[in-house]
Each structure stands twice: as structure tokens, then as C-alpha cells.
Amino acid sequence: MSHLTPEQLTEEARQELARLTKPLSPKQRLAIPEQEMPAQDPVARRGNMQEVALGYSGEQAKLEAERCLQCPTKPCVKGCPVGINIPAFIQKITEGDYQSAIGIIRESSLLPSVCGRVCPQESQCQAPCTVGKALKSIDKAVAIGRLERFVADWERENGLIKSPDVKPATGKKVGVIGSGPASITVAADVRREGHEVTVFEAFHRPGGVLLYGIPEFRLPKAIVDQEISSLKSMGVEIKTDFVIGRTRRLTDLLEKDGYDALFIGTGAGLPKFMNIDGENLVGVFSANEYLTRANLMKGYDNRAATPIFPSKKVAVLGGGNVAMDAARSAVRLGAEEVHLIYRRTEAEMPARVEEVAHAKEEGVIFHTLRNPTRILADERGWVSGMEVLKYELGEPDSSGRRRPVEIKGSEFEMEVDTVIVAIGNESNPLIRQTTPGLQTSKWGTLIVDDTGKTSLDRVFAGGDIVLGAATVILAMGEGRRAAAAINKLLL
Amino acid sequence: MNRILSKRQLSAEVFQMRIEAPLIARERRAGQFVILQLNSHFGERIPLTIADADPVEGSITIIFQTVGRTTHLLALKNAGDTVEHLVGPLGQPTHIEKFGRVICVGGGIGVAPLHPIAQAMKAAGNEVIIIMGARNKELLILEEEMRRIADELIICTDDGSYGRKALVTAPLKELCEADPKPALAVAIGPPVMMKFCAETTRPYGVHTMVSLNTIMVDGTGMCGGCRVTVGKETKFVCVDGPEFDGHLVDFDNMISRLKAYKPREDADHHRCHLEEAIKEKDVV
């Protein structure tokens, strides 16, 4: 498929819109071509960190919105973890009333610019979409995420974001630990009710995984900073360089510092490794480390003091969004070849389809049904290659997916100088180790009840520290739930 | 916040700073460290051990050697200046109890992190014998402070310019053979020194604790850049350490990991000295 410029896509949409004669029948709506997301040219973007997806123009947004059938069953709403009234906001886009459209989204979601970019819509709201079903392809569902992003960007770019009203001070104090999507949601929802809110962040900048994990080319930092400044303008205090469990214990916040309730949203920040030989060689990185160096520490900029390992041939292990982010970052940081190694097939990859497509367009080489058995070293202890085993698909397992089965004796060597391990994260142990009585599962995640309350009184939790590594929107949903419970507790 | 209260040059490339950090001073225990960053946008995060703390004054003392870009910039700061970011205390505190005879071995700048541990060991009622080593007399730091703590202080220099002309492993071996046998050795210094201290004590079965200073980014377990091989397991220095059983640490692996960014660090180091030279010339 040849690359179309944003101008070309807009022009096509303009012509198509002019041809539409209202009222549109469902058949006519189904005939409207799905609107492609304008993107930076794949060759150009290999050399820069700027956002790849450029966002719909007004014409494209209006045309895409016309594809929605406004069906009475609204399966999309059930597919959305926070239950956004999707048909209603899409209807407002067709009317050109973007202000009302974003207003409808904001009733349920606090971070539309973020979620419009990073939500896995194809497995959530867009999965059950009637249009996609009628056209027999999820790829042809209404592009709800792109429309959400369109109105959220419209609101931000026009300076129309209003910080929510804050009720009169209640004198109650709430501490929020971590500053990722779950914590941002709790801070806003609790502050709105007039409670004093302090956010504690271990890093030097707030934003959590939105900042250190998701790269600039997928989620510009300016958008995260905007969300943080909204919190600040509501009067939320943010303490960076503050590690709960080390700088101050959680129990001290409750017992000595006068906090009436706490929310733990510290995420799943403990990288998993493969437990194979050679994993501690020079040149093997967790995706967390690689992405943090590249993103938060700005390794792509030659003014940054944080060094990035000079790689020529990179292997990324894993098939999720983090693996795509790491591979695509490696491309941009100048690697000559970037290989992605995944044990199953592309159909089973947890990464969003769009991220997989973008990675391929940028030249990442995919190796599916492959898994490394050991990492090889040169005489200095630096990575020189990887021994890889081939797999084939066997019988379906209990989950119904065909299980990858190793092909005995199929080992081969791949020459690489860098290995990035992106096979998931576990929950960070710091808080549970330093907080007696906090109950955890065997995976180290915090156990909460259906209001988000932990085993400790007045202590709530949500996001990846409860779910294991999940998504921004689920974290936000958890934050909403916990904030409601905290607000009820403090009544 | 994070105001520098005092600065002292201990040797050609080693500086001591007292920094206002009341929260860290209150919580820190022997063996813990901080992460410091000088510029929010382009600065790097570097781990530095806490050499001392005064919870009443609300200050911590750090001792650092100018090796990379950040330590060179830090050395240019003076009392009254501030450090943009300081986070801690990080890492597991040293396990302190009354063991009996404890040998504390410090090499070079490793004497700085050793100081609070020796202090705590002494306070717990141990007999503390301190061995300090440096290439020459000029590079020796904290001699007076250590002398105040030590039941016996042994100084070694490579060139014999002060104390014994020996490596720290020589008196360590003698002490392992002496009666009473040491209950514990604590060795902190360059990785090669720690490796050989561990090899020295191994035949005598003297438990030997080492404190590792590896490359880190976040310091809270998130990146795993600091990981080391201990026994057959992978451990994170930032959350599992920084102290480990010296007899189980794979020092060769650790030493090679420390060199991951060596070309870049050498270039920075060179540039820092050039910049300093240019600055001095401008002043003249």
C-alpha cells in the first residue's frame, strides 16, 4: 500500500462527504470507505521521534463518524471499560459539534487524548461494533479511538480544556502513590470533592508509564504534561523524588502524617527476564530500561547525559505493545537491523494491530514461532549472538489457542549485539515489603475488594499493581472505582 | 530543597558534600544510597552512597569521585547551590547486629560507604578492625573519621607512601588466620578489590559482605540495569542489595557490565577536563 499524505486523505474525504446525500441509509453508511489514519512517511519517521499517527482532519473525522449506524444495541459501549456513550459523541461529530462530543467523553473518561492514542480499541469498543460485524472484519469497525483522539486533540489545541470545578475544602487529606493513569484519575476525582490530594512519584517527573514507557512517537510527552498541569491547576500537590516504602513508609503516612486515605497506583514496574543463559551479559536490557533511557531520559537527544547502548543488530523478545515500542525505538536510535522474536504466531501477538503494522512499515523484521534458548558472548562478556529454537503450532491448549511446540534439534544462531527482553512485568515489591498486613496474590499483585480497597483500612489500590500488566483504560477504570470508594469513605 | 551546606575536597578527584535532605536523613540506615540528578531535562540519574547523615540538622553527606559528566558538574557546585533532584534512601539497609570481631575493608572511595557501616557495627558492640587502602597517601580519605571508630586501624598504600606498602588483602589474610577468627568481613571498594577480598576470606570460611555500585537508572527495581549474578540467581542491586555475599557474587560479570558505556564515559570525562582547563584559562 502506498503512503498517502494527510492532505491527500483529507481531499479524498472532502470529495466523499460532498457526494453523501442525507439522510443516509444504513446501506449507504456501510459503503463509506473507512478512514485511514494519516501517518508520517515510514522512511522519514525511522529517523525521528515525533508522533507517527498524525490524527484525522475534520473532514476525515466527519466522514468516519457517518459510518456509525447509531444502532440501538450500542455494543461498543459495553466493550468500553469505562462505558463512554460512544454513539452519542460520534453523532455530535457528524454535526460538527466537537465541544459536545468531547463533553460526552469527559463524563466517563479523564484522559481522552491518551486513551484515543493507546487504547487497544480493536479488542474493546471496536471489537463488537455492528459495522465491523456487517462488513465481516474488525478492521472495518468504526474507528472509535481515532474519533476520540480527534475531539480530544481539538479541545486541547484550541485551549478549551477546563480543569474540573473543585468543591470547598473538606479538611480531609488523601495520598496517591504513583502518578500513572490510575493515580491521575484518582487524584482528579478525589480532589474534585474538595479533599486535599498529594501525589507521590519516585521519578523526577510525574506521569508514570505514560512518560517512561510509551515512546514519544506514540504518545507525545506534551499530552502527558497537559494532564499533569490540569491536576496542578486543581490544587493537587505533586511530590517527585519521593519513594513510598523508602523516603516514607505507607503506614507513617496514615499514622503520623495525617492522611485519611491512600491510593496505591505504583504499576507493574518490575521487569521479567527469560531465565536463560547469558541474560546478564553486556548488551541485554529489559524493555523498561531501554525505553526509560530512550524516553524519560531522552537518550535520543545528544544533549542527554544518559547513554544509550550503541547497537547495530538488535533482537527484541516478545510480542506485546512494549516489544513493538522497544523495537521501533531501536530503529529510531540508529540500529541497522531490528529483529522481533515471538514464540507464537502473529495472530496471537498481544500487541495492537496498528503497532505491529507500524513496526513492519519501519523495517522491523518479524520472526514468529521462534524462541531464544541462550544468549552468546564474545570474549569480553558482550552479546555476540543468540541461539534460537524453532517452534510449530500444535494442538489447542485449554485457552483454545494452538500451543507452540518446539521442534527438536532446530536450534540456529542469530548474530546480534543487543537483546531487549520485553516479555512482561511483575509488580514492584517495594510497598508490599515495607507495609505489614498488605495482602498480595501469589503473583505479588495487591488483593482488593470490589471497591478497590486493600486488606488495610483506608488503603485502596488500582491499575497494574492490582491487575498485573494491563492497559491505560483499565487502570483508569480502576482509579475511578477506587476514587468513588474513597470519596464515600470521607463523606 | 537539596541545598548544599558545605563542600570539601578530600583528594584530587574526590569531594565531600553535606546536603540538606531532612526526609532522607531521617529514614536512612547504614548501607543505603541516594540517586542524584542535576538537570530535569537532560541530566542522568546516578547512585551515590550516603557516607553520613545528621537527622537533627536534616542533612546527608555524600562523597564522590569525578568520573563521569554528572560528578564533574557536581564538583563545580558550591555551598548554597542546590541539587535539582535527590531521591532516597534506596536499597536495603545493612544487617547490623553484634557479631563479634568485624573486619571492615575499604579501598579508595569505597571508604565512604564503609564509614556508616563501621559506625553502626561499632555502635552494636562489635570489635571493629578497619583496613583502609589507597594507591598513595594523597588518595586516602576519612582517616580521622575511621580512626575514631576503629578498635584497630590498618592503612595500606600501593606505593608505601603511608602505612603498610601492601594490598588490603595482605592484612585481611593475616586477620583471618589470627585468633579470634573474624565473625564477618565487610569489603567495599573497586570491584577487583572486593573480588580479591572475597577470595582471601573464602578458604577461612569468613562470611564476607560486599556493597556493589552498579549502573542504575531508576533505583527502585523498575529497569533492572543494575542486575548482578549472585550464586545462580539474578539480583537487582537497587532493591535486593546493594550488599551481597561476596563469596557468591559473579564479579567478572559485574565488572564487564560496568563497562557497558565506557567509550561514552571516557569521552565525557575527557571533555569535562578540557572544559575545566578552558575555564581556568579564561579566569587567568
Image: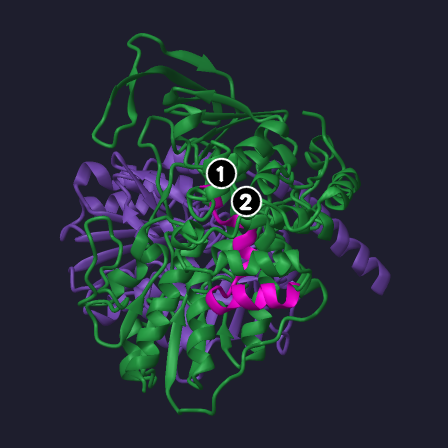
Chain colours: A green, B purple
The x, y position of residue A299, in whole percent, is 62, 46
Task: Name the residue at 24% across, 72% down.
Answer: B123
The x, y position of residue A480, in whole percent, is 39, 67
User: How far apart, in angstroms, are the residues tagged by discs 2 and 1?
Assistant: 7 Å
Mark 2 burial class by Cα count in 10 Å: few <14, some 14-19, many 20+: many
Kind of residue at disc 2: Val
Task: Name the residue at 28% across, 43% down.
Answer: B246
Where does the N terminus of chain B fall, quadrant-wise?
A: bottom right
Q: Is residue A285 left or right of residue B265?
A: left
A48 shown above or below B121 = above
Q: How many marks?
A: 2
The x, y position of residue B18, in whole percent, is 51, 73
Q: Is residue B170 left or right of residue B84?
A: left
Kind of residue at disc 1: Gly
Q: Which residue is mark 1?
A: A132
A136 shown above or below A269 = above
Classify residue A234 by image quadrant.
bottom right
Task: Name the residue at 61% across, 61% down.
Answer: A92
Taking depth in this image into account, of B27 and A33 the one nearest to the observer is A33
A28 shown above or below B51 = above
The reply to whether the C-beta atoms of the residues labelled 2 and 1 are less than 8 Å apart is yes
Q: Main secondary structure of the magenta part?
A: helix
Classify residue A386 by image quadrant.
top left
Q: Is residue B264 left or right of residue A251?
A: right
Q: Which residues are magenta?
A: A98-122
Circle on res. A142: 2
